[in-house]
Image: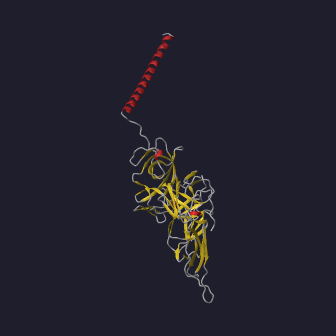
Amino acid sequence: MNLKDKIQKIIKPVLCTVCLVLTGCSAASMAQESTFESAYENGVEEEKVNIYTSTASVIIRSVNEEDQKISMYLINRNENRDMGYNGATVVQDKYENAMSIAQLKPGDIAEITYNSELERAGSITLSEDAWSYEGVNKYNLNIGNGNASIGDETFSIDNKVLVFADGHVIDTSQIINQDILTIRGKGHSIMSIIVEKGHGYLDIKNDEAVLGSFIEVGQTVISQIAPDMLITVPEGSYTVRITGEGIEELREVQIERNKETILDLGDIEVAKIQDASVKFSIMPSTAAVYVDEVKIDISRPARLPLGLHLVTATASGYDSLSQYFQIEEGVNTVRMTLEEEADISGNDIFSTEKEEPKITIESPVGAEVYQDNLYMGIAPVTYNKTAGDHTITLRKPGYITRSYGITIVDDKNDVTYAFPDLDPENSTVSGNSASGQNGNTNRNTNGNGNNNTVSGNSVSGNSVSGNSASGTNQ
């Protein structure tokens, strides 16, 4: 056997082995592929792992579509958290119909699944057992006592309730009894409140000729015009009617939320004046005052016929005092100071009657203070206390005007309130709380340019947006 035959004898078995190996691999590959195709055709897929294993009841605070973040309050955990979301996040209404992220609104009550480590929401579904009352204008919110009423229904409420105005969270005390609300909750608990329709302010200027006349703002406000008034009015369009002796005027005004509209009455032509406005400054402030033997209320200006009038003031523990005053055109001020009674020996007799209880508005320092539209002075300011629901309005040049509702108990105790600092104009606002506890400066003009002006039945000006204690809206 030569060399060539020997080589062929060795190569042939090797080639056969290689062919067998290759043939086996190809068969195995074909068999495996066939198995995958069969599995696919039979609908067998690899099981997915659910990473959204945490659940919570939440109140939506805000949605940031640009950053794909949702700020929410986790009710049971009593904490605020920001959750991310993506295109795979399922959003549904209470009937499990699909929604978009943009349809979620502040104050919505929802059930979510989420991944706590990733801080990402897997699903958001509006709560099936949550209720919502919209357009509520008859309510009473008493956070201190933990109860509230909507119409004739009674609910529980606490200081964790979230209140929204213009997309911002505000304090419950910033709701006043003129606001229109949407109220949401579960069972008999109120969980979120949205201010649908807020309030603005009507600032009366150049009112000397109409003091003591009546002003009607639509069907919402009727009041006697007093010096330095700032009237709180629900936002909206109104016809203002001013009536008095020789006066019948109509003006159109637009009231915007947290915005002042100036009503300039300097152009009113008044008929021949038969009477005039009279302010009273009597010490002590508890004195009863009579004009021509008719008792009058001295807490606000009165209108008296021109001419000479007898004014008498009496108070327990003081000598009565009677004086004649000449009432002339314009604004008149009657000032009287009573002297304490004295016994025969010359010793003073001190009255056992306690002085009238007072309200003190302590802060924000330097702010103009109004109670129920009437100017009280510059904070800190103290004035006589009257029981009931009141609206306190705070105003300062360069800052956003704010109103708060307070409820004054009918007792003999003084009460002091310290309200939050006012927010500068054009700032992003979130509400702060005002606290109350038991315990005359010329009015400033508002120097900001964010006012509407109404004069001669025309309205002009710029608008400003912004963002009130409990009260009953009847």
Q: Residue 84: image x %, image y %?
A: 51, 46
Number of numbered discs visible in the structure rendering: 0
Q: Quadrant of residue 342?
A: bottom right
Q: Position of residue 231 (x, y in %)?
A: 54, 61
Q: Position of residue 265 (x, y in %)?
A: 57, 59
Is 320 or 265 nearer to us in this picture?
265
Q: Position of residue 211 (x, y in %)?
A: 56, 65
In the displayed structure, 261 sits above or below 24; it is: below
Kindly identify the residue that appears in the image at 42 percent across and 50 percent down: 126
Q: Residue furthest top?
A: 2
Q: Which quadrant does the C terminus fall into?
A: bottom left
Residue placed most toward the observer, 59 or 336 = 336
| Vertical order, 54 against 173 (above or below) | above
Residue at x-position 43% and y-position 60%? 138
Structure colour scheme: secondary structure
In the orientation shown, which residue stands out farthest toward the bottom?
345
Q: Quadrant of residue 133?
A: bottom left
Is residue 388 in sight in this rendering?
Answer: yes
In front: 191, or 267? 267
Is 265 positioned to the left or the right of 45 in the image? right
Inspect this view and state whether residue 464 appears. no
Q: Residue furthest left?
A: 42
